[in-house]
Amino acid sequence: MATTRRPMMAANWKMNKTVVEAEQYMAALLPRVAGAEGVDVAVYAPFTSLPAVARMAEDSEVIPGAQNFYHEDSGAFTGEISAPMLLDLGIGSVVVGHSERREIFEESDDLVARKTGRALEAGLIPVVCVGETKEERDSGKMWGKVSGQVRAVVEGLGDVSAESLVFAYEPIWAIGTGDTATPDDAQDASDKIRNLLKELKGEDFASGVRILYGGSVKPENVGEIMSKPDVDGGLVGGASLKADSFIALVEEAQNHAS
Ligand code: PGA
């Protein structure tokens, strides 16, 4: 079953790049990934660069994505951006519950679940991030934390297809630290998440959902991580900021396409 999942390589720019820098990046990326068969390539840009990224990606296979949104469609929510606003720009996907949103901006499991539900309804592919801190891992609480995050999202879901959402296992201690989880750690967490999805939503759903790994992924380590059977790609911050480095990651992901 694992071979039927399409690998995905996702660039998470975080709070980086002006519009001009975003345009330069896309101009370098697009011709180089035009032939990337069998892999989904997504770029999660800051809101200000989304119009440029979406416009430039329009005639390509690259999925333009946002890093966050709010689950209400309009109204008195100062500073927020809604699903219809993203759809209006041609955005196809959105990161939900990134650990930086959870830790710095105090997004709760409940909020992450609402955002996931709204993204699905709107036809935006949510990339739902889960992961534990160093302290949680060291004190044997990794799975308690991650399973709670997955349950909060999945228990509220109606009838959705496995292709309509993506999970990203991102141990917080590995994000931006250079301290990558071992390929076995990534596999172990992904396998556990897949088994929980099976328990909650059945075998077909669980075997079809893509689970990415994120946390200090770079061209040198992505091959080994993606060779693990339950890891379907990467959500990449630092190593996605330069087009050349992200292109190398996409090329490696292609080696894992069926
Ligand atoms: P990193 O970030 O690749 O810089 O560790 C990954 C992420 O936070 O999505």
Image (spheres, rainbow, N blue to C red):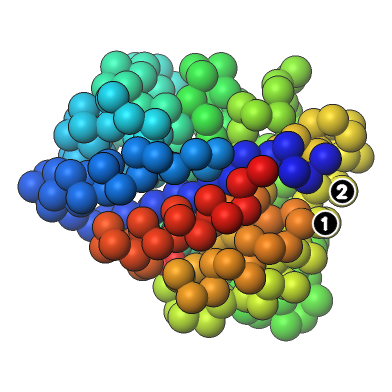
Amino acid type, label 2: Asn
Q: Do tag 2 and tag 1 residues touch (Cβ < 8 Å)?
A: yes
Residue 192: which numbered mark, if any?
1
Residue 195: which numbered mark, if any?
2
Mark 1, other Cα within 10 Å: few <14 / some 14–19 / many ≥20? some
51, above or below 255, in the image: above
- Can residue 31 be seen at all in this image of the molecule? yes
Where does residue 145 sit, x and y in percent of width and height?
Answer: 73, 60
Where's the N terminus, which quadrant?
A: top right
- Left or right: 177 with respect to 168? left
SS class, disc 1: helix
Quarter residue 131 falls in: bottom right
174, above or below 124, in the image: below
- Can residue 128 be seen at all in this image of the molecule? no
Query: At 45% from the left edge and 70% from the top edge, which residue is drawn?
Result: 218
Where does residue 128 sit, x and y in percent of width and height?
Answer: 58, 44
Mark 2, other Cα within 10 Å: few <14 / some 14–19 / many ≥20? some
121, above or below 52, in the image: above
In the displayed orientation, state which residue is furthest to the left: 20
- Left or right: 18 with respect to 247? left
Where does residue 120 sit, x and y in percent of width and height?
Answer: 57, 23
Where does residue 148 sit, x and y in percent of width and height?
Answer: 75, 51
Amino acid type, label 1: Lys
Residue 100: which numbered mark, if any?
none
Query: At 17% from the left edge and 34% from the top edge, which residue is drawn?
Result: 52
- Of 126 and 20, which appears nearest the observer? 20
Query: At 49% from the left edge and 50% from the top edge, which residue is drawn?
Result: 9
